[in-house]
Amino acid sequence: NSFRNMAGIARVCQACLRPRVSQFSLVPTGRAGFATCAFTVPSRGPTPEQTLFVAGLNEGKFFGQDSAEETLKLVERVAQHSPEYTLLFGISDRRLAELEQDNKVKQGRLTPSRDLEGRLHCEMVPVLQAGMVDKRPRKHVGRSVFTDQVHVAWLLWKNPQEARKVYWAFWRQRHYKDAEARSFWAKHFPVSSYGYFEERAHIIAIRATEHMMALRKQEMNNSTVLVVNNDIYDLVVQHLNDFLGKDAPENFNSQEFARKLRDTAEELCQDIIDLTPLLVFVYVILPLLIFQFFFNAGQYYLKQSGMLEQLMMGESSRRL
């Protein structure tokens, strides 16, 4: 009964947090509360309901709003009502494996936050270790970093007006994190940022939905907690709202719906030619070579014309 009550609360949360937009926007929407929400696929006959909790984490944040601390509290509550829960992480399989390898649980205790600060995805480590302590499955639902790179590079190559601003943006982006970082990139790189933020969120939502479909097929009512970075939290929720909406029970039994998810995932994860070296050559190395050519040509002209010696002699005479 307690789990049923919790599922009812989850449905209320879903209704309250459901986006009211007709198309996706890379610009984050303002929110005053914590980056958490829940989606429940209701039961149908003998098939029990499934609940997915989504938590957004700020980069490197362990305490306070949108932190590892709040997500740990969520996982603890879920574990009390559904001990057979599953943890999903919105990162690649390689990064999840590295986190597990580098952060083994010792004597059933979590690693102190001071020992984790500064590491990549350090904010996810406490949640990951909590799953280790509870001996619960931990799965990745993000795509590889290389795929992110090649997709963004392709979009930059097709949009030279954005590629020309990369060097400038590289020195500015360090001032922005999480949702503000997505706002920055979406403002100055509206096309290429789509390949990094929107596509990442889309594949995470698809794989989380496929996980829920697998649970339903096995007639399991275990809860699932999805942990993502806050730079794409809003986008993930928007996609999940479409996949796990009121038609979810019927869609989960549809071969067409499953095929559409599979085809979209394959398209989003398709590896294409890596144009990063070409972009670096055209927009970094080539301008430097051109600058060096004209600089050397100017020096050669001044030397041959004698103007350089005259300038140096004039400067020496003024000093004397």
Image: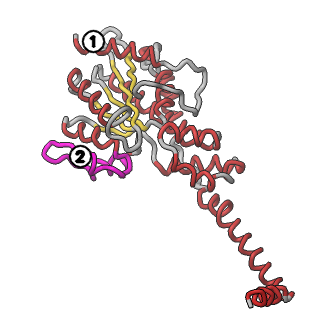
Q: Residue at x 70, y 71 (%)?
A: 289
For the residue pair 181 and 279, the one nearer the viewer reads as 181
In the visual, does 62 lie left or right of 76? right
For the residue pair 148 and 318, the one nearer the viewer reads as 318
**Regarding mark 2 in the picture, which secondary structure is present there?**
loop
Q: Residue furthest left?
A: 107
Let me know if residue 105 is in the magenta part: yes
The residue carrying mark 2 is 112
Residue 187, percent from left and from top: 63, 39
Which numbered marker is on residue 4?
1
Q: Residue at x 13, y 45 (%)?
A: 107
In front: mark 2 or mark 1?
2
In the visual, does 291 lie left or right of 229? right
Q: Residue at x 23, y 46 (%)?
A: 112
Within-10-Å neighbours for mark 1: few <14, some 14–19, many 20+: few
- Which region shows up in magenta? 94-122
**Residue type beneath disc 1:** Arg
Q: Residue furthest top?
A: 45
Q: Residue at x 29, y 31 (%)?
A: 86
